[in-house]
Image: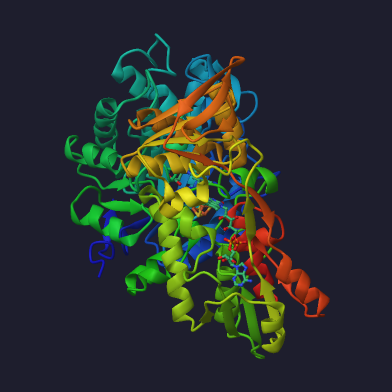
Amino acid sequence: MFDHIFRPGKIGNLEIKNRLVKPAQHLGTANYKTGFITEKQLNYYRNWAKGGVGLVIVEMAAIDYVGAAELPGMIMIGSDETIPGLTGLAKVLKENGASAGIQVCHGGGCKLGQPSFGPSKFPYLNIMGMKQDCEEMTEAQIEEVIQNYGQAALRAKKAGFEMVEIHMAHGYLPDAFYSPKYNLRTDQWGGSLEKRMRFPIEVLKSVKKNVGSDFPVSCRISGTEWEEGGITLAESIPFAQALEKAGAEAINVSSAGAFTHYRIIIPIYYPRGTNVFLAEEIKRSGGIKVPVICNGGITVPELAEEILATGKADFVAIGRPLWADPEWPNKAREGRVNEIRPCVRQNISCGGAAVMKSGVFTCSVNPEFQTKYEGTLDKTTSPKNVAVIGAGPGGLQAAWVAATKGHKVTLYEKRDVLGGNLVEDAVPAFRVDKARLLSHFRHEMKRLGVNVRHEEATADTIQKGKYDAVVVATGSKRSKPKIKGIDKPIAIDFVEALQGKMKGNNIVILATDYEIRCVDVAFYANELNKRATLLFTQENVTQLATDMGAAESGMQSQAIMDVLPKTPNISMQLGVEPVEITDRGVVVVRKGKKETIPADTVVYVPEFVSNDEIANALEKKGVKAAKVGDCVEPMRLMCYAIHEGHAAAKKL
Ligand SMILES: Cc1cc2nc3c(=O)[nH]c(=O)nc-3n(C[C@H](O)[C@H](O)[C@H](O)COP(=O)(O)OP(=O)(O)OC[C@H]3O[C@@H](n4cnc5c(N)ncnc54)[C@H](O)[C@@H]3O)c2cc1C
Ligand SMILES: Cc1cc2nc3c(=O)[nH]c(=O)nc-3n(C[C@H](O)[C@H](O)[C@H](O)COP(=O)(O)O)c2cc1C
Ligand code: SF4
C-alpha cells in the first residue's frame, strides 16, 4: 500500500528497513543531575522501535557540560561515564528492529542559562523563548568545542550507535556560526559564506576523524531560519553541498533560527509538510546525492508516501506523530491507517499550556506517554457492562479504552454525530488533523464494537440499564455573555459560527486573548470567502500574542501572528472595547470615543458552565459514576478530557 515508505534505504553503509525516521526530540527524562539514560527513557525508545520506524535518532545529547542546553532531563554525552547508559539505549533500539542514531549538540546562545557562548555577543532567545545574552567565543573555546564534538561522536559509536547526527539547525551553535544574523565576526570564523561555514565543517571533520570515514554521519540543518538577516534557502544549498563534500552521509532539513522555534514544530496554522519544499530544493537544486531527510507536520502516511514517491526527499521524519502513536509505522504497513491515532499539531502538551502546568512533555491524544497512566491496556478477565454518557473527546477515549480492554460498552450521545466539541473544532479546512482525529475516533468505535445510542441519557435510563460502571462525559453548556444587544439575530457564538451560521460577507468577531477559537473562526470565514475583523481590547500585539500563548501554546500564537497578517480577508483591530451589538454591527469604545463597526454577523465568545446534571442525578440515586472532561470544569483543553477519560476507563 505504501510501497515507497516501506522500501529499505541506506545512509552511508547503514541499511535501514524503511524510509521513516524518528527525529531527535528532547523528552526531558534523562537523569536530572547526570544526564544519564533512565529506565523511563528506555521504555519510550523501545516502544518507538517496536512500532516499526526504520531509524531512530535519539534526542539531542550535550557534547559537553558548558554547551548543554541545560534543559531539565537532557541527555549528556560529554564524558565517558555516559557510555554504559547510552549502550543500553542503542541496544534497546537495535533489539527491537530499528537502526540506532543519536544527535550530538551544543546549545550555543540558545542554551538555557549562563555561561552562554556563541560566535558573537548577541541578544538571543534561549530554548525556553526567554531573552538572554550570549558572549563571543574565543579561538581557544572554538577549538575546544570542535574537539568535544568529535569525542562525543566517538562515545556514541562506542555505545553501539550506528549513526551520529550533528545538530546544525535551530539557532544552535553550528547554525549560529553559519547564520549571517548571529555571526558578526570578522576573523577566520565569520564574514564570507565560506568563513561562516568553517565552524560547522570543522565540527563535521572532527566527528569524521573520530568515528572513521565509514561511520554514517547526518547533519541536521535549517533550510531557512525564517528570520530577517538569517540563513535563507539560497544559502542553505551551498551549505548542504559543502557538508556533503566534507563527508556528511545524510542531510536532514529542518528550519528555524533562535527566534523562530515555532517553525520547527509546525503548528496547525501551517499546512501539513510545509517545510518539505526546503528539503526538495536542497536535494534538487543543490544536486545533493546523499540521502535527504525532510521534516515537519508529516502526520499521515499518505503524505509521507507522496513525498517519497515524487522524489522530494529520501527519508521522511515523523516526530510528533510517533508521540501520538508509536505504532504509526506498523499500522501503516498493515493498511490499518484509520487506526493510527493522529497528531493534531497543536503543541499543547508537547510544548504549550499543558507542559507549563505539569512541567512534563506529554501528548494530548496519547495519555500513555509520559503520564501517570502509562502502561499497557491489558484485557480484562471479568468483562463489565459499561455506560459512557457523552461522545466528546473524553467519552470517546473512555469508550475506546474500556472496549479495548474487553468490556461491553454502550456510548450515549444525544447529537446525531459523535465527537462533542471536536465536531466544530474540526470544521475549518486548515484543521485537517483535528478532522483526522475525529474520523479516527469514529472508526474505532465501530471497529471495537461499541454500542452507540444516539439518545439523551437520563439518570433513569442509566439506572434501568443496570450497568456495572458509568463514565459521565457530558461536557459543558454555553450561555451568552452580558453585552447589550447580545440577543439580536445578528449575534452568534463561535460554536454557531463553526456550524455554518455566519450570514453575509462582513464578519466581526469580539475576540479574547484566552480563546484562540476566535482566530479559528476568522480563518474559517476566510475559507468561505468572507471578510473577518477581529476586535481585541489589548492595545499591544506583543502582549496579545503572549496572552494567547499562555492560553494554549506559545507556538500556536506565534504562528497565528505570522499567518494572520498574510491572510488577505482578515484584519485585526486592537484597543477597542465592544459595548453594544446593534442590528448593523458593533458599537465600540476606542480611545474613549464611541464608534460603530458595521457587520453582517457578529461572533462572540460564549460563557461555559459544566454540564453535570446527570452526574448529580446519578449520585442522588446512589449510582456511582466517574466524571471526566468539561463536565468537571468547563472549556478546558481537549487533552484533559482525553486523559481523564482514559484514566477512568483504565481503572475498570
Ligand atoms: C469550537 C470549539 C473548538 C475547540 N477547540 C479546541 C482546541 O483546538 N484545542 C483544545 O484543546 N480544546 C478545544 N476546545 C475545547 C475542547 O473541545 C473541550 O475541552 C473538549 O471537547 C471537552 O471534551 P468533553 O468530552 O468533556 O466534552 P464535549 O466535547 O463537550 O462532549 C460532551 C458530549 O456529551 C453529549 N451529551 C451531553 N449530555 C448528554 C446526555 N445526557 N446524553 C447523551 N449525550 C450527552 C454532548 O452532546 C456532547 O457531544 C474547543 C471547544 C470548542 C467548543
Ligand atoms: C518536544 C520536542 C523536542 C524536540 N527536540 C529536538 C531535538 O532535540 N533536536 C532537534 O533537532 N529537534 C528537536 N525537535 C524538533 C523535531 O525533531 C521535529 O523536527 C519537529 O517535531 C517537527 O516534526 P514533526 O511534525 O514530525 O513532529 C523537538 C520537537 C519537539 C516537539
Ligand atoms: S501534544 Fe499535540 S502536537 Fe504534540 S504530539 Fe501530541 S497531538 Fe501532536
- Classify the position of the N terminus by image quarter: bottom left
Taking the image as drawn, is residue 274 in sight? no
Residue most toward the top? 186
What colour-coding does the image apply? Answer: rainbow
Q: Where does the image place residue 560, in percent across and percent down from the top left?
A: 46, 35
Q: Where does the image place residue 329, in percent across and percent down from the top left?
A: 38, 65
Location of residue 368 with respect to 76 vertically, above or below: below
Taking the image as drawn, is residue 414 in sight? yes
Is residue 433 or residue 419 the one in the foreground?
419
Instruction: Classify residue 243 as left or right of residue 411.
Output: left
- Classify the position of the C terminus by image quarter: bottom right
The part of the image, by quadrant, that contains residue 467 is: bottom right
Location of residue 343 with respect to 334 vertically, above or below: above
Is residue 433 or residue 181 the one in the foreground?
433
Instruction: Classify residue 19 as left or right of residue 453.
Output: left
Q: Where does the image place residue 101, in percent across and percent down from the top left?
A: 43, 52
Identity of the residue drawn at 22% across and 47% down: 312
Instruction: Classify residue 44 as left or right of residue 312.
Output: right
Is residue 608 or residue 241 the one in the foreground?
608
The part of the image, by quadrant, that contains residue 9 is: bottom left
Location of residue 168 with respect to 266 vertically, above or below: above
Q: Where does the image place residue 386, in percent across and percent down from the top left?
A: 64, 83
Location of residue 438 with respect to 84 vertically, above or below: below
Identity of the residue drawn at 40% across and 67% down: 52
Identity of the residue drawn at 39% across and 16% down: 189
Total marks in image: 0
